[in-house]
Image: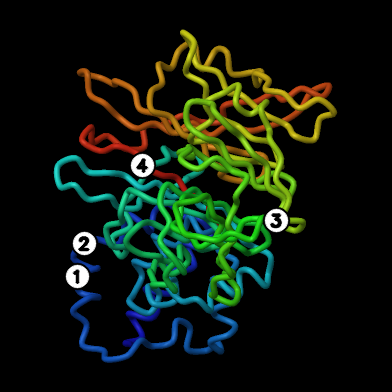
């Protein structure tokens, strides 16, 4: 790398690290094209006077929101931004951040692709497609664990690393399972659904048939544990969603038929009929409280279920009345986007009767034991009306 090129890269990179908005505009498409066509065969050190470990340590302290701009500096920077070593160092330094991804279905092409929510202070948030990730099936269970999300459907089992934006296959399920939902506890993914199992009854008889079963995938060992057949769970129920609170997995069926809590450490199940009072598909958990957007009334409300209360029940979250009175929300989902924060995604008809996807960032708090929220921002994050939101994932990178 020539001295002038190094000086320019150093100037740009330091400006990005400092949060300058000017340098992002100064990197033109022609400059980026020249980087791609550069004859250098191998990346040069980012800062020749510094050891590589020191360089990684410096970049690890930069907010992730600056990484897209920083990756434009050179091919070397782009390689570092995609390096697992960088995110490992961030974890060691305790500088991890929440990132939100949305799987959007394109009705024109039939593809579903992940988009990342770029959150910019004092600027409009937006969803940007992650070009390095391939199209995904919109059917199946998506389970975030750390910086990864595990995908299980009838065709494949995958691990998506949102730090490096790469996908890997993982060992397939030990046997076929349909109509499953999944959540993770202590680094293990629990799938519950219908599976064709061999079974033995208490009277000594045995046989085979479709039954409710639980499959457990250990994300550390990357192995499956033995399948557990659940004779006491009603076969045929279709599960609508699942959540994890206080180390327990909560599962709910469609049409408010059944809701269960599962304690994996003790392999204990119990009915939770109070959860059947609401249709909480597309919900999220923040600080062991379950939140979902209820659109059954004229104006939407944000509902909360706190299992730590002496008499757990659903309650309306206060402080959002004015917001929901103005915003006509549709097809909504909520997802954790930070400490004591959630993001509400919803579609609405915008100018010229155009359907757009919006995102409201909501801060969570308590007053005299009641939950109060405050809308920090609300932006149109995606404007193509031919897209539908399929899934949301909150990961830590």
Taking the spot 57% from the left edge, 52% from the top edge, the residue there is 183
What residue is drawn where x is 54% and y is 71%?
224
Tell me, yes or no, whether the two marked residues, 3 and 2, touch with CB atoms within 8 Å. Answer: no
Whether tag 2 and tag 4 are in contact, CB under 8 A, the answer is no
Q: Circle 1 — which element?
A: helix
Q: Which of marks 3 and 2 is in front?
A: 3
Quarter of the image where one finds residue 260: top right
Q: In which quarter of the image is the N terminus?
A: bottom left
Q: In this view, does 220 lie to the left or right of 390?
A: right
Secondary element at image label 4: strand
Which residue position is annotated with label 3? Answer: 264
Q: Are marks 2 and 1 in contact (CB under 8 Å)?
A: yes
Query: How is the model colour-coded?
Result: rainbow
- Earlier sequence position, callout 3 versus callout 2: 2
> Around disc 2, counting alpha carbons within 10 Å, would you say few (fewer than 14), some (14 to 19), or many (20 or more)?
few
Residue at image location 22% in from the left, 18% down from the top = 353
Disc 4 and disc 3: Cα gap in Å? 28 Å
Judging by the rendered image, the residue that carries numbered circle 4 is 390
Give the Cα separation between the discs numbered 2 and 1: 6 Å
In the rendered structure, the answer to whether residue 138 lies left or right of residue 170 reads left
Vertical order, 257 against 35 (above or below): above
Q: Mark 1 points at which residue?
A: 33
Residue at 67% across, 32% down: 364
The first of marks 1 and 4 along the sequence is: 1
Q: How far apart are marks 3 and 2 (CA)?
A: 53 Å
Q: Can residue 397 be seen in this view?
A: no
Q: Which is nearer the eye, 343 or 215?
A: 215
């Amino acid at each position: 790398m020539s001295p002038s090129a190094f000086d320019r890269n150093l100037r740009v990179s330091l400006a990005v690290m400092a949060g300058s908005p000017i340098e992002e505009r100064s990197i033109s498409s022609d400059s980026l094209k020249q980087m791609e066509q550069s004859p250098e065969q191998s990346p040069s050190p980012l800062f020749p006077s510094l050891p590589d470990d020191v360089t990684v340590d410096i970049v690890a302290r930069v907010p992730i929101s600056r990484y897209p701009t920083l990756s434009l500096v050179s091919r070397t920077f782009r390689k570092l931004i995609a390096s697992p070593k960088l995110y490992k160092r961030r974890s060691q330094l305790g500088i991890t951040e929440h990132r939100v991804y949305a799987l959007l279905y394109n009705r024109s092409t039939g593809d579903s692709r992940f988009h990342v929510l770029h959150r910019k202070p004092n600027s409009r948030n937006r969803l940007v497609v992650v070009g390095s990730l391939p199209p995904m099936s919109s059917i199946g269970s998506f389970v975030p664990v750390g910086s990864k999300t595990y995908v299980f459907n009838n065709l494949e089992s995958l691990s998506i690393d949102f730090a490096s934006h790469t996908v890997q296959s993982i060992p397939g399920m030990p046997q076929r399972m349909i109509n499953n939902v999944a959540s993770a506890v202590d680094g293990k993914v629990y799938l519950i659904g219908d599976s064709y199992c061999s079974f033995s009854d208490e009277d000594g008889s045995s046989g085979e048939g479709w039954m409710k079963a639980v499959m457990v995938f250990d994300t550390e060992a990357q192995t499956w544990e033995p399948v557990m057949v659940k004779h006491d769970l009603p076969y045929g129920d279709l599960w609508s969603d699942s959540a994890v609170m206080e180390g327990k997995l909560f599962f709910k069926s469609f049409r408010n038929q059944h809701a269960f809590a599962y304690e994996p450490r003790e392999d204990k199940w119990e009915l939770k009929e109070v959860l059947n009072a609401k249709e909480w598909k597309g919900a999220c958990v923040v600080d062991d409280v379950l939140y979902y957007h209820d659109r059954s009334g004229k104006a939407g409300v944000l509902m909360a279920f706190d299992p730590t209360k002496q008499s757990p029940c659903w309650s309306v979250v206060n402080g959002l009345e004015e917001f929901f009175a103005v915003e006509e929300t549709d097809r909504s989902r909520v997802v954790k986007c930070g400490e004591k924060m959630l993001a509400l995604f919803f579609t609405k008809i915008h100018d010229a009767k155009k359907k757009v996807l919006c995102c409201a960032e909501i801060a969570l708090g308590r007053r005299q034991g009641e939950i109060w929220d405050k809308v920090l921002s609300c932006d149109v994050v995606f404007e193509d009306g031919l897209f539908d939101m399929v899934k949301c994932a909150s990961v830590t990178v």
